[in-house]
Amino acid sequence: MVIMRRSRTAISVEILKAAMEGARKTHIVYNANLNFDMANRYLVMLEDKGLIEHKGNMYITTTKGKEFRVIAKELGL
């Protein structure tokens, strides 16, 4: 059995996809198949880069994040 590791970009794209219409952290964790510790680290990084916004208890993909998803998809990441 071969276990493939996902790249940082692939994980980021999955998080941004989960938060397209707004999502709570639990929803992101389950949809991106992460644990809460990993999700916290990625959410902080994505927020710092302006790809995701934290409003109340919801995370929402920004316009910049949506553009990033499109470019990553075109590159096959």
Image (tube, rainbow, N blue to C red):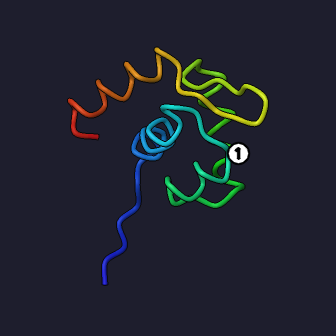
- Furthest-bottom residue in view? 1
- The quadrant of the rendering that contains the N terminus is bottom left
Quadrant for the C terminus in the image: top left
Residue sitting at 71 percent across and 55 percent down? 37
- In the picture of the structure, the residue carrying the numbered disc 1 is 40
Residue at left 64%, top 61%?
35
- Is residue 59 rendered to the left or right of residue 61? right
Residue 42 x/y as whole percent: 61, 41
Q: Nearer the viewer, residue 51 or 31?
A: 31
- Residue farthest to the top, as pictured: 63
Amino acid type at image mark 1: Asn
Name the image quarter holding residue 54: top right
Residue 14 position by quadrant: top left
Q: Secondary structure at mark 1?
A: helix
Residue at the image point whose x is 37% and y is 73% from the top: 3
x, y percent for residue 48: 66, 22
Please tell me which residue lies in front, 31 or 2.
31
Q: Mark 1: few, some, or many residues within 10 Å (few <14, many ≥20)?
A: some
Q: Is residue 34 above or below residue 73?
A: below
Front-lying residue, 51 or 77: 51
Residue name at image x 64 percent, y 33 percent:
59
Q: Is residue 13 left or right of residue 49?
A: left
**Count of numbered circles in the view:** 1
Farthest residue in the right direction?
56
- Residue 31, image x, y percentages: 50, 54
In the rendered view, would you say 25 is above or below 56? below
Q: Where is residue 9 drawn, in percent x and y? A: 42, 39
